[in-house]
Amino acid sequence: MVAWFLRVLTSILFLASTVFTIPLAFDVGGRDCGLAFSFTLAGFYFLYSLLRLATPDESRFRKALVNIVATIQWLVIPTLLIWSLNRYSIDASNNTLKDGSGWVERTFNRKRAADQSVQGWLLGKDGVMESVLVGGWDKTLRYSVPVFQLAEGFCTLLVIQAAGQITKWLVNRDGGDNWMIGLLVLSASIISSSLYFLYRITTFPELGNVDAMLIGAALAGVIFLCAWGIGSGRGNPVESSLLFAYITLCVYQIFTDYQPAVPAQDVPAPPQPDFPPLPPMIMASYSTLLHLFSTLPSNIHSAFHFLIAAIMTITPSVIISLAYRVFVMYASTRIIPAVRESGARALSQEPSLEDSDGVGQTLGFLSWFSPTILIAVYTGLLMQHFASSSGNGNGEWWTSQGGDAGGNIWRWSNLGFTMLLYALELYLGKSDHNGLTSHWKVD
């Protein structure tokens, strides 16, 4: 129980440190600073995962080394952040050439002749090693955006189908009528909430004619798929409502950052009353407490302001996308083995390298490197957000530092890819096929 609690606490601290520090590096230090910090952080956890994977149970020395690295990781994260902020500047002219060339030109241009030694050319500021590593990480994240986006749609479809099969099993067992009524109410609630967010989308000022046509085509397609699934018996209302909700989520994420459309207006402070609202004894204690906080060391005030600054750099759309993507990918690692051969028992077991099938071994291998994958996914979401903002004219600072002014092409591609996969499943599937619940006992 204690080990499980420590594991959960460590995971929460890792998520919090990653969510707060990476956007802070992008906001304070600029694009290259954020990429360098993300790369070094991912590299550290990659080496840490390799060390854990290569440590046998009988090796005391390597176990002690793993424990030491796990202890000092909370010092490594701020150290890497400070190093990245110290090495890079927010000034784009120091990190990108005026002609807009990339990291290859910046490394091998004629300005490198000013270096005093080969060591400075290789390992110095903007040297070969630094530019190749950071530039390579930039290219890797750019090319992995469609992979992560399409993987999100595929994993979402797995979760939707698993939920549909479980609800079929609940309805077909004893007392299924009660389950049917409750699931119908749940499906109606999901669809009603989705319709509300669709209405919110129509109020966005940046919505154009082309966007409206794409939204109409997406909604027509998903409504047709939902009706086809329910009418043919190969789907059910829960599957249809979840698919409709996911398509609505994709469209909503394309056009909003979950921020209020109209900034909050400053409300004038109410006039002070002639008499204190509380008894004099309580007011005196309150004044004493305020004075006590004002006399705290300046380091505590600086830490508090630093924490507030880190929280303000977080984009709600990126956090919601990250939380949803982590959830569906983690759920897929439990669903895939259950559908293949293990049945419902696999839902309560994590994939391992000791599994008999290759899929389970692959998922178990990837689970060892989940911190590195999480950092890559989060950084890719941030870069996708910055590129989309720049493409809409709201993020010029990103393009001024060499970033791509992309759009939401891969979000639309994921939307169409998910509906196409579901259509193929309905066309090729059978109404009585329950790969997940076929191993479950029904009294």
Image (cartoon, rainbow, N blue to C red):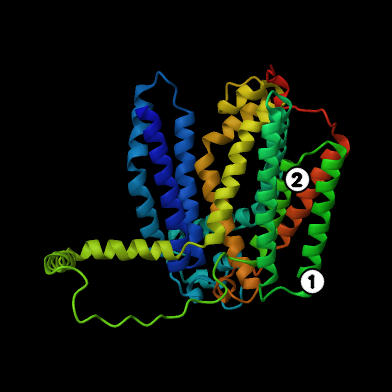
Residue 24 placement (x, y as % from top left): 43, 62
Q: Nearer the viewer, residue 352 or 403?
A: 352
Residue 10 placement (x, y as % from top left): 39, 40
Residue 352 visible to an observer of this rendering:
no
Quarter of the rendering containing residue 176: top right
Q: Nearer the viewer, residue 314 or 100?
A: 314
Quarter of the rendering containing residue 11: top left
Q: Amino acid at mark 1?
A: Val
Q: Residues at badges 1 and 2 in contact (C-beta under 8 Å)?
A: no
Residue 281 placement (x, y as % from top left): 11, 65
Q: Image height check: is 204 above or below 171?
A: below
Residue at 36%, 38% in the rendered image: 69
**Residue on which the image places disc 2:** 240
**Residue on which the image places disc 1:** 210
Q: Amino acid at mark 2?
A: Ser
Q: Nearer the viewer, residue 183 or 267?
A: 183
Residue at 69%, 66% in the rendered image: 199
Q: Image height check: is 195 above or below 202?
A: above
- Mark 2 burial class by Cα count in 10 Å: few <14, some 14-19, many 20+: many
Q: Secondary structure at mark 1?
A: helix
Residue 10 visible to an observer of this rendering:
yes
Q: Image height check: is 49 above or below 404?
A: above
Would residue 382 be found to the left or right of residue 6 on screen? Answer: right
Mark before the other along the chain sequence, 1 or 2: 1
